[in-house]
Amino acid sequence: MQSTDSSVFVVVDIWRVKAGKHDEVREVLSEAGYLFRARPGVLSVDFTLLDNDPDRYLVVFRYADAAARESFVATDVLKATMARLSELWDLKSPIYTGTPTGD
């Protein structure tokens, strides 16, 4: 069912796995997915490998609203997960660094 709530806030990004780190990334994402989805205001979190590039994940976070996103970004669970992932993938995307990519 598609949401008709216009306040839903979505973040989409693509992250590249460092060479030889695929198994570790899958393990972290499996654990993190459950923890992230349990947070208030997080509607869904999806990680999927791109068909044409097995070193890249499409990452989609859906939040109840922008305030839920801001609250989630400040959580220890996200900070700890991102610290673990920093050793496993290239997190230089504009979304991760906070660089605006559109209006």
Image (spheres, rainbow, N blue to C red):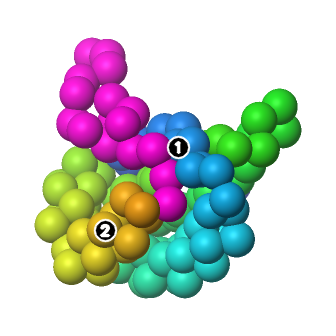
Q: Residues within 10 Å of mark 2 (few under 14, many from 20)?
A: few
Q: Is residue 78 above or below residue 59?
A: below
On the image, which quarter does residue 73 sit in?
Answer: bottom left
Q: Is residue 92 visible?
A: yes
| Whole-percent x, y for residue 101 in the image | 32, 20
Look at mark 2 in the image and give the residue it sits on.
83
Residue at image coords 67%, 59% = 20
Residue 50 appears left or right of 84: right
Mark earlier in primary sequence (1, 2): 1
**Segment tinted magenta in the rendering:** 88-103
Looking at the image, the residue that sits furthest to the right is 51
Residue 34 spot, x, y in % from top left: 53, 82
Apparent side of residue 27 relative to residue 95 in the rendered image (left or right): right
Q: Secondary structure at mark 2?
A: helix
Give the percent coordinates (x, y) of residue 71: 17, 65
Residue furthest to the top in view is 103
> Between marks 1 and 2, how big is the CA–CA gap?
14 Å
Q: Cβ–Cβ below 8 Å for labels 1 and 2?
A: no
Residue placed most toward the observer, 7 or 69:
69
Residue at 70% from the left image edge and 53% from the top image edge: 48
The amino acid pointed to by label 2 is Ala
Front residue of this view, candidates 67 and 3: 67
Q: Identify the disc placed on residue 15.
A: 1
Query: What amino acid type should be assigned to the residue bearing mark 1?
Result: Trp
Quadrant showing the N terminus: bottom right
Q: Residues within 10 Å of mark 1 (few under 14, many from 20)?
A: some
